[in-house]
Amino acid sequence: MKYAGGHFPNEKQTLLLKAALSERLKAIRYFTEWLEANHLDNLDMTSPNFLSDFMDNLDLGSHRMLPMVIHNLGEHTHPYFSFLLGTRKNYWVRNKQIEHKAIQIQKLLEQHGIPSMQIKGLDIASRFYENTAHRPMNDGDILIPFEFRKKAIELAGKGVLGNKTKISQLSMKNFTHALHLEFEGDVDIDLHWNTFREYIYTPGSCDFIWKNATIETKSGVINYRMSATHALFLSMVHGRNFDSTPPFRWVADAKTIIDKSAIDWEELLEIIRRFQFKPFLKKAFPYLVEQHQFNIPGDFLESLSRLKTDDLEEKYYRSISGDIRKYGLISMLWGGTTKRILYYRLFLRESEISLTRFIVSWYLNRIKASFLS
């Protein structure tokens, strides 16, 4: 199977993933191949520039995969690793800063009667990884029930959450599934009222997550926790979009969740059937088995392969998995508009807003946000 698009790992990233996820002896071989593929196998370790020589030509996703590679191979397996342990510690400190800020926000939300749930990296790192440093984060993500969206936006707009959110962020609130909150110390938190940006106008799309969530107390704050099956679905879907650097973290997250949990494969299949992400997931799960030998039940894969997708769903998938910027501004405008039209037809066609009004409003708010930022 050909894995086209910028949302599946490229060849070099696949080698690094195999070094992080494979049995140790195989992983050592994959790491050696990865070093050779990136021309990093003969660096001068006595050079004061060794660390920059090693890191500067790697994409950010590869940077963040290195702590897991070191853990899987062992700290003393390769002489390079002694130079990289400081980077791993920096990731641990960064993760702790994000976690601390997330708990502060959850406490403030709780004081205003808003329940909350840590999701994505915040949730996965603490639940499924042996060390949170093995799962570096750029920011944190918190989910609140959709019915508290307006109240949470008002709190953020007034700075009650301690954030310094830009006015431009608030101007796009009707076109996004989350609010990006910025804080002192270069710590960012995304406050979600929906986990999927495609379903921002569907209030009940996350009800299945809240319905089966458990409650825990984390640093004195009530935190809802989604099931492992739902965490796997969310992690997989997170890899569906194009990026100039393929977002391959979803592969390692999926492996870690599956290995550490009892996944309800029947429920997962029903969730996949319900949402319009099937074209990507029908490629992603076989990829995990073929490239990384994931332990996924055969009957699940067979049932998944038989799920039907309509033409509109396939077109939308192609629109989000390709690079609309590769031919410049015209390409970006054409591709962006096409994507918004397909988005409307797939997710908003039964809404009260017309297609013309939706497209015009979206562009006007983007222009407004650009001037306000």
Image (tube, grey):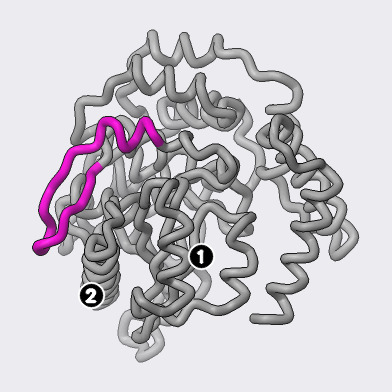
Identified at 52% across, 29% down, the residue is 281
Of labels 2 and 1, the one closer to you: 2
Instruction: Name which of mark 2 and mark 1 comes first in the sequence.
Output: 1
On screen, 248 above or below 58? above
- Residue 93 tag number: 2
- The answer to which of 309 and 209 lies nearer the viewer is 209
Residue 194 located left or right of residue 73: right
Name the kind of residue labelled 1 in the image. Asp
Which residue range is magenta in the image? 207-225
Label 1 belongs to which residue? Answer: 59
- Quadrant of image for the C terminus: bottom right
When asked about the image quadrant of residue 319, the answer is top right
Residue 222 located left or right of residue 32: left
When asked about the image quadrant of residue 300, the answer is top left
Name the kind of residue labelled 2 in the image. Val
- Quadrant of image for the N terminus: top right
Q: Position of residue 164 (x, y in %)?
A: 45, 82
